[in-house]
Image (spheres, grey):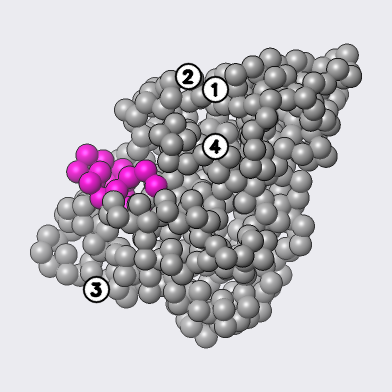
Amino acid sequence: MIINTLIRNVSLVNEGSTSVCDVLIEGEMIKEISEHIEDFPQNTKIIDATGKFLIPGVIDDQVHFREPGMTHKADIASESRAAVAGGITSFMEMPNTVPQATTQELLEDKFKIAAKNSYANYSFMMGGTNDNLEELLKTNPKNVAAIKLFLGSSTGNMLVDDEEVLEKIFSSTKLLIAVHCEDETTIKNNLDKQKKIYGDDIPMELHPVIRSAEACYISSSKAINLAKKTGARLHVFHLSTAIETDLFTNKIPLEEKQITAEVCIHHLWFDDKDYKEKGALIKWNPAVKSKTDKEGLWKALLDDRIDVIATDHAPHTLEEKSQVYTKAPSGGPLVQHGLLAMMEAVKQEKISLEKVVEKMCHNPARLFKIEKRGFVKKGYYADLVLIDLNKSQTVSKENVLYKCGWSPFEGTTFHSEVTHTFVNGHLIFNNGEFNDHIKGKRLLFER
């Protein structure tokens, strides 16, 4: 049965401007966008969205949903549910699960799980190792988001540190290569110094000293030089330092860039002063660094050297996070609150709502060449989010939806709320209520 929805009198934020209009959804697609729509089918549900803002569904290009193998922390169902509540309608998930997605068969196993359980649209990245080039080259560019390489901070055997292999990968594939850049030798030396002083119980505020700006810059500059040498299409995940931003350009349009960059919510929100209160709850790799670094990231985001905002959602249990420094894992849950954090920045006039939509919706679609998503356009999938900018909520353990049961934003009051999330035309999230019967689709790519 085709479900039609007419969203009336909404402030539509799309392609750099905001205007009040009506949007008609017919089935899975956007049928019409007009100042006032009078002609629509009889069975159409009407939503009066006066005073609310409509944006394209957020596309999160970096999440860790922990399935298979680590489902005590999270799973595709629980985290995609939290994601749609936070306005994320599509995600790209990383390969460092158990087993790791380093063969085509293991990669497709994850797609099968998502087809049954994901509330949001999905893709999964194929993981590179020092010895799986043949498998990497089998990756279908039409239905797989990218190849993911850990050039630092890997799990299992996913650290790609053989320079000859790296150059072969960069030279051999036309697929987008997404990288985590931290220099392992620098980090190991820094860690050894601190362990001599503190043993395993290193103060958490030394995390950015151990996983230093230097470690990030060495690795990211090396990856960029290799991309320039080979002509590879490179996307550098989660920039965390001001110095790295100078490695990227804003002199050419995004569609012409061969080398692009992402920043994550936590590196825009927290800085090293927050370790005292938050401790391991804000222990990420790369580390949350100085206020100067945070300011440098904001500057590069606003001047378009940084192209995408993502979450790097990576949950762990509180029990795991409560361990001493060397055993407490890095990462935290963010998909439910990432868009709200950016709405807070809009209210603080750090960034415009149009710019948030560009960085969280339009640019991921452009950068990954996602088919018919990321914009509010006739003939595109109706992945849409309604936001009330005048509704406050305070994050608490009682209202987080993550399987791990906590958030680094606990105690924070956000002054906006996601009220409705449509995925492929279906109203999946409606003022706190979920439609559990509809699942997302596999993302396809125009390559």
Counting labels gives: 4
Dot 2: what SS? loop
Tell me where residue 239 appears, x and y as whole percent: 43, 59
Query: How far apart in space, not on screen, are marks 3 and 4 (Cα)?
Result: 42 Å
Query: How far apart in space, not on screen, are marks 1 and 4 (Cα)?
Result: 13 Å
Range drawn in magenta: 268-288
Mark 3 or mark 1: which comes first in sequence? 3
Neighbour class for label 2 at 10 Å: few (<14), some, many (≥20)? few
Query: How far apart in space, not on screen, are marks 1 and 2 (Cα)?
Result: 6 Å
Residue 138, by quadrant, is bottom right
The label number, if any, that marks residue 353 in the structure image: 4
Q: Is residue 253 visible?
A: yes
Amino acid residing under circle 2: Lys
Query: How far apart in space, not on screen, are marks 2 and 4 (Cα)?
Result: 16 Å
Q: Are marks 3 and 2 in contact (CB under 8 Å)?
A: no
Residue 341, by quadrant, is top left
**Which of the pair 328/385 is nearer the observer?**
385
Amino acid residing under circle 1: Asp
Residue carrying label 2:
391
Residue carrying label 1:
388
Mark 3 or mark 4: which comes first in sequence? 3
Q: Residue at x 71, y 49 (%)?
A: 443
Tell me where residue 217 appears, x and y as whole percent: 38, 70
Mark 2 or mark 4: which comes first in sequence? 4
Residue carrying label 3:
189
Query: How far apart in space, not on screen, are marks 3 and 1 (Cα)?
Result: 48 Å
Amino acid residing under circle 3: Asn
Horizontal side of residue 165 vs 189, given as left or right: right
**Which of the pair 233/84 is nearer the observer?**
233
Assign the magenta stretch its main secondary structure: helix
Dot 1: what SS? strand
